[in-house]
Amino acid sequence: MKKKSGITIIGVFVALLLIVVVLGVALVQKYSSNKERVSPEEIAPVAEGEAHVVFWQEIYEKKALLLNGGIYLDFDTVFSRINKYFYYDTEEMVLTYTTPTEIIRAYPMEAVYYSNKEKKELSHEPLVTKGGEPYVSLEFAAMFSDMTYTFFEQPARVLIRTESKDMLALKAEKGTVVREAADIKSRILYDLPKDSVVWYVDAGTEADAKFVKVMTEDGVFGFVRKKDLGESYHRSYVSEYEPPVYSHISAEGKVVLGWHQVTNTKANGGLETLIKNNTELTVVSPTWFQVNAVEEESPILSLADAAYVETAKKHGLAVWGLVDNFRIAGRDNFDPVQNSYVILSSTKERENLMNSLVAEAIRYDLDGLNIDFESLSLETGPHYIQFLRELSVKCRANGLVLSVDNYVPSAHAAYYNWKAQGEVVDYVVIMAYDEHYAGSETAGSVASYGYLTNAVDNILTMVPKERVIMAVPFYTRLWTETKENGVTKLTSEALSMETAKVELSRNNVTPVWDEITRQYYAEYEKDGATCKMWLEDMQSLQEKLSYIRKADLAGVAVWRLGFEPEDIWSLFRQDVLVNE
């Protein structure tokens, strides 16, 4: 019996030993780390001819193309993430970039680009297409952008850095590894030697609180145990990119610009009468040029006149020829909105228009061009800004002042992009009138004091004051309200300042000062109708000019010459515009 009992004890001991061994193995397996490695091909698989894209510590949703030794990103990505000044003409398949002195163009499948039409060789094509979509070479984009990039193989990936940035970095305190998941049982992606640096991506969740998500310096994403890393610290990437500096042509002293409405060649002869006793005016802008219908042979219609320019300069005036997009005499079927889109969205048509305008300016010895493009559609906005960028290059090269007329800043016209205009043109002109216009549903002021002050304040958030000209009206509107079958009908007509005074005198009406609009207001009955006027006169203009003076803007413009009494010009003297 004793012998049998000893055997039993030994058996129990062996069994316990086996249990301990099994448990030990299980514990070792549970708490020991996985040594299995992920092959380079498995880390982030990508199709042949493509590469992953990483912007800083962000894996981008789209892939780069690898073609003929070049790395390409789709145009939308280049525009939105790298450089918003690239422009692509979808119809003509032309990539354009403008600098202060160059208009740079590239075409598909040509290993060259053209700077002001001069051919420049490249190692590979700056522009390719795939499935009809444009792709831009990173090498080409980097020539003009605040961007650097590095390419790595296995897996194919390109790391892109744009602008200066402050990032969180971590240093390995000892040799460790980067794993594919926040778990020591996950496979190894990357060896991380002591003192190597990784970029912080994400601290993780409670489930993986012992790990931190990082990106290695060569763009591999994974997880590292926190205890193997030091404290995070800020590490700055400082860009060495120097943005282009746009030069601007500025007038001496404050600008006082008067628009001269010229609708036919005969009207050119009226300049002498308009300016003969005027010593305050510095610039005259005749409405000479009209954008022609796109199907016509000439891009513009011109009323320019050499004798006019000679007269203006004899009186010490600069001449800025105005071009508008909204009128062609005798063309009832002319659609200025669609015509403007067709011309401005076409590289070829823009080029023809710009060359014609600059040629006319040179031919007639003009000092500048004044662009008055109105009623543009939302979809035309980007093409309009590109037109101004390109035109500014040509004007700068020829010593021509480029000024652009604009509505007062508002949300519904934001696609006129006043900030972008202010970067490239010499003067941004704000037409601070037509607060109420011929088609308005209610009667009201053409240009109340608040309308102008808001315009001044808003534009100065986008354009430097030395490039802002504020335009004021020399006219008012006579509003007439009549009732027919209980329905009120509203009409109006524009009156010059003198004509408005005569109208009130003829009807024995004395206007009263309105402190809100800071204008004299008149209301009276005539022929069964109610007439209303918010007058522009010496006092209302003095209020406006005082605010312009305090804002220290580049100057003032007026619409239009011939609508004013002679004594109004005393308000525009240079000492009045400059001093309190």
Image (tube, grey):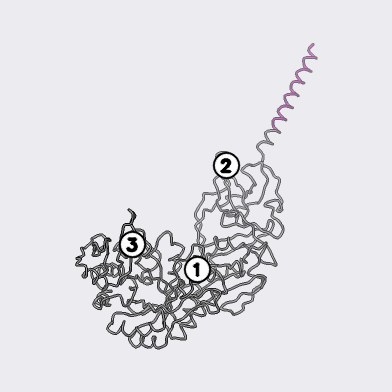
Residue 532 placement: quadrant: bottom left
Q: Quadrant of the C terminus?
A: bottom left
Mark 1 to mark 3 CA distance (whole Å): 32 Å
Q: Tell me, for residue 210, which label it has, or none.
A: 2
- Near-viewer residue (327 or 113): 327
Callout 1 amino acid: Asp
Image position, residue 305 (x, y; %): 42, 85
Pick whichever of labels 3 and 2 is earlier in the sequence: 2
Image position, residue 259 (x, y; %): 36, 76
Q: Are marks 1 and 2 in contact (CB under 8 Å)?
A: no
Determine which residue is flagged by label 3.
454
| Disc 1 secondary structure class | loop
| Disc 2 secondary structure class | loop
Determine which residue is flagged by label 1.
335
Q: Are marks 1 and 3 in contact (CB under 8 Å)?
A: no
Q: In the rendered picture of this protein, how many numbered marks are placed on residues?
A: 3
Pick whichever of labels 1 and 3 is earlier in the sequence: 1
